Amino acid sequence: MRTVDELGRVVIPVKLRRRLNIKTYDELDFKQDGDTIIIKKASITFDFEDYLRKFIVYKYGSYYKDITIDKVTCKEIEDILCGYFVDKLGDTR
């Protein structure tokens, strides 16, 4: 059992921190489920669709701002990205 201090802090036991790989300054998410507090290690999410849309607009202009990524095939994405890097780095084949 742990005690909440005057600032609302609770110490997570070291065994639990090690088991969950929680390090100093890691971010944690807190959720409530009835009278239970759920604490989860925050995960870094990457919105590939949003990133790809911004990249396409940056590279090819605002004409593509409303592009629906799920209708773009993997081959088209590969061609767009390969073309970009060939433009930037030159063809290294």
Image: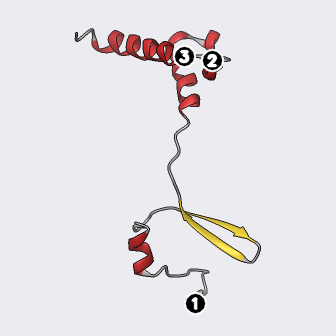
Whether tag 1 and tag 2 are in contact, CB under 8 A, the answer is no
Whether tag 2 and tag 3 are in contact, CB under 8 A, the answer is no
* Crowd class of label 1 (few under 14; some 14 to 19; many from 20; radius 10 Å): few
Which residue, given by chain and number where applicable, does mark 3 sit on? 73
Q: Secondary structure at mark 3?
A: loop
The amino acid type, in three-letter code, at marker 1 is Thr
Which residue, given by chain and number where applicable, does mark 1 sit on? 3
Alpha carbons under labels 2 and 3: distance apart: 6 Å
Whether tag 3 and tag 1 are in contact, CB under 8 A, the answer is no
Residue 45, given in percent of the width and then of the height, sits at 53, 45
Q: Secondary structure at mark 1?
A: loop
Location of residue 38 (image quadrant): bottom right
Location of residue 71 (image quadrant): top right
Alpha carbons under labels 1 and 2: distance apart: 53 Å
Observer-nearest residue: 19 or 32?
Answer: 19
Q: Nearer the viewer, mark 3 or mark 1?
A: 3
Residue 61, given in percent of the width and then of the height, sits at 57, 11
Residue 90 sits above or below residue 68 on the image: above
Answer with left or right where residue 16 lies relative to residue 67: left
Q: What residue lies at 23% left-to-right and 12% top-to-bottom?
A: 92
The amino acid type, in three-letter code, at marker 3 is Thr
Alpha carbons under labels 3 and 1: distance apart: 54 Å
Q: Give the mark nearer the N terminus: 3 vs 1.
A: 1
Residue 26 sits above or below residue 73 on the image: below
> Could you say which disc has been placed on residue 58 in the image?
none
Q: Give the mark nearer the N terminus: 1 vs 2.
A: 1
Q: Secondary structure at mark 2?
A: helix
Which residue, given by chain and number where applicable, does mark 2 sit on? 71
